[in-house]
Amino acid sequence: MNVKIESSKIIKPLYDGIPPSTTTHIPFNVFDNVTFDTLMALIYAYRPPTPPTSTIETGLRKTLSIYREWAGRIGEDEHGNRGVFLNDEGVRFIEASVDASLDEVLPLKPSPSMLSLHPSLKDVVELIQVQVTRFTCGSVVVGFTGHHMIADGHAASNFFIAWGQACRGVEITPLPMNDRAIFRPRDPPLVEYNHVGAEFVSKLVNNELVKVYDNDEKKEKNIIVHKVHFTLEFLGKLKAHASFMNGKAKTYSTFESLITHLWRVISKSRDLNTLQNTQIRISVDGRRRIIPRVPDEFFGNMVLWAFPTSKVKDLLDEPLHYATKIIHDAITKVDDKYFKSFIDFASDEKVMTRQDLIPSANMNEDTLGPNLEVDSWLRFPFYDLDFGTGCPFLFMPSYYPIEGMMFLVPSFIGDGSIDAFIPLYEHNLTNFKKICYSLDLKAK
């Protein structure tokens, strides 16, 4: 796929009336500061008829006048607080073309070629970049990159809905709640959980782990991102299998059942030492967990993580419901008390400095083994981004060859089935393909 860049420019918010001040600085809150400090990339594909590029561009400019953080720049204020300057310096907008029909390059697979369908993620100051790539058949691929410290998946999906509304000429609703300062520590603070080793790690310990990894001459470099499709029928069987325990029914969610299955299958495929521990990192949205509830329209980050852990032998030898319960209980634990404990802990600058802590969220690693991370986009309405001629027929993450970092997205089929993007070492992938639909696993 030969992608030709036709133009690249900076576009700025389009205001209806007098533009606001461009000197405001919004400090990041504790959730912004603990999330991934990186750009994330998404791919949308549309069949003809498709809207003019000018419609997509103008709609984006109008939306930026409401979601102003995206058009700003990350930096520190006079007190050293990191945040975003609402300076309207703008976002990158690229027009590109491919001298082929989209059908000639389908199916779009998670491979290095995907990187040509969105702007670069390296050395970028713009917090949003958009690339509109047109194919000879009239189809369009829209590649989007956005900085994670500005918005989590929930907030980003609200932005996409608004962008579509602006392109269609309808009122943007609901409006975002732009107040990152609502998360204040209690007086006195009450830290009830250990957040070191969860959301935070010691910089010294982290550096030692990096050294160990870098000195491992045996590590395999060839990582393949494999896309696997789970039908609604299989998901139903999996859920029923996970929910049956000691002759009694305990209903777990499809999400809990699926990630339990993947945790087991990937651990088996990796051929891990059965006596070692394995952990899976699962994001938990706090909007509906903190009391009083935070509105769905809150724009920013509000995610912490659950860290279910098991010995490999137990994970594989025990019935499926064993690990499903571990996952369910770990997610349930990240409740109102946990979120407020985190706010109190992360707001104590003296403790953070004295212990030399940094966020554990890190996308600069090549492998997560023996652990896993799952980013679920199952509940976000990403497929609803309609620029005026209909919703995308395909939505997917870009190419992220980080061994063990999974993405779950609703299948484009629209029947409730799920696509999972699984990065694995090539020598482990063969075994994964053999057992990825098996419910009968043992350690040895």
Image (cartoon, grey):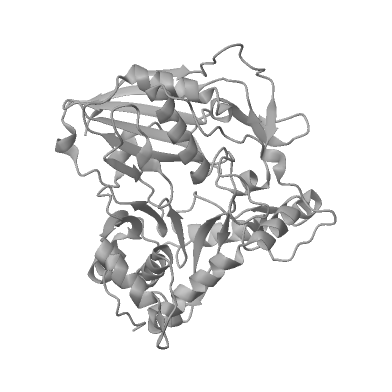
Q: Residue 312 falls in which quadrant of the image?
A: bottom left
Quarter of the figure that contains the C terminus: bottom left
Left or right, residue 25 beside residue 210: right
**In this view of the protein, which residue sits in the foreground, 384 or 227?**
384
Quarter of the figure that contains the N terminus: top left
Q: Residue 18 falls in which quadrant of the image?
A: top right
Residue 359 at x, y percent in the picture: 62, 52
Total numbered circles: 0
Residue 16: in sight, yes or no?
A: yes
Q: Examine the rendered structure and indicate whether residue 141 appears above or below residue 17.
A: below
**Residue under the image location 26 percent in, 46 percent down:** 109
Q: Residue 408 falls in which quadrant of the image?
A: bottom left
Residue 33 at x, y percent in the picture: 64, 45
Q: Examine the rendered structure and indicate whether residue 250 appears above or below residue 153.
A: below
Residue 93: in sight, yes or no?
A: no
Left or right, residue 211 beside residue 429: right
Left or right, residue 48 beside residue 322: left
| Residue at the outermost right position | 188
